[in-house]
Image (cartoon, rainbow, N blue to C red):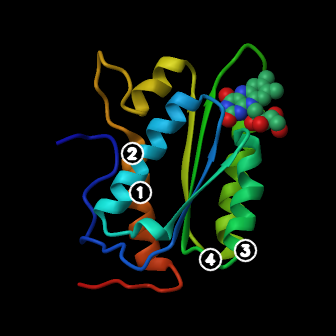
Amino acid sequence: MAIKGVGAPDQVYDGNGLRVAIVHARWNAKIIDALVTGAVGRLKELGVLDESIEIISVPGSYEIPLAVQKTLASQRFDVVIAIGVLIKGSTVHFEYIAESVTRSLMQIQLKENKPVIYGILTCLTELQALERAGLDEAKAMHNHGIDWASAAVEMGCKFGDKATTSS
Ligand code: RBF
């Protein structure tokens, strides 16, 4: 059994009826695409209907919080998955963006009282990001987008407006 990463959920959650938005940045597009694809595939496996999934793109990670805020304020969604890929460069942009986006996403979910799933990779190298999107052939690592979708369905069912927890 893996030591790191999310453990098994306490029950199987049914995503049918859950409305999920994915707000993603377009920086580092190849990695983003793999993460979004992984998330969408898992949402569908968990019963979220195609027409209940909306994908919204913004230029970069810095733009994600406002888009998430507006998306939740529209009252059209039960949960939002925020996906961005920040890769450290030679300036301090990375630190500023990572810090402000992370803090903002936490504030938004508490203010809007709806789950925001934190799908922001903050990697020191491009290889680290590729690995976490399951794109590094040498290691064939896990696509984190899959976990974010599982978290979205669990949080939406447990804490969303239409809490549908069944046991
Ligand atoms: N956005 C990302 O999503 N990931 C990045 O790794 C990233 N690196 C950036 C590095 C620099 C030097 C700058 C200026 C912007 C970067 N952005 C990145 C874009 C940022 O999130 C935002 O879209 C723009 O700054 C416009 O507000």
Location of the N terminus (image quadrant): top left
**3 and 4 marks in contact (CB < 8 Å):** no
Q: Residues within 10 Å of mark 2 (few under 14, many from 20)?
A: many
Q: Does residue 138 sit above or below 155 in this rendering? A: above
Read off the residue under disc 4: 76
Q: Does residue 40 sit above or below 140 in this rendering? A: below
What mark, if any, has residue 94 been given in the picture? none
For ligand 1, the image quadrant comes to top right
Q: What residue is at 55 percent from the left and 18 percent from the top?
A: 125
Q: Residues within 10 Å of mark 1 (few under 14, many from 20)?
A: many
Read off the residue under disc 3: 73
Q: Does residue 62 sit above or below 77 in this rendering? A: above
Q: Is residue 124 visible?
A: yes
Label 4 residue SS:
loop
C-alpha span from label 2 to label 4: 23 Å
Q: What residue is at 50 percent from the left and 37 percent from the top?
A: 33
**1 and 2 marks in contact (CB < 8 Å):** yes
Tell which of 86 and 52 is nearer to you: 52
> Of callouts 2 and 4, which one flags the residue occurring earlier in the amino acid sequence?
2
What mark, if any, has residue 149 been given in the picture? 1
Residue 114 lies, in percent from the top left, at 59, 73
Name the residue type under label 1.
Ala
Q: How many marks?
A: 4
Give the left or right position of residue 46, taking residue 89 as reference.
left
Residue 157 lies, in percent from the top left, at 41, 77
What mark, if any, has residue 38 been given in the picture? 2
Instruction: Between label 3 and label 4, give the one nearer the viewer.
Output: 4
C-alpha span from label 1 to label 2: 8 Å
C-alpha span from label 3 to label 4: 8 Å
Instruction: Between label 1 and label 2, give the one nearer the viewer.
Output: 2
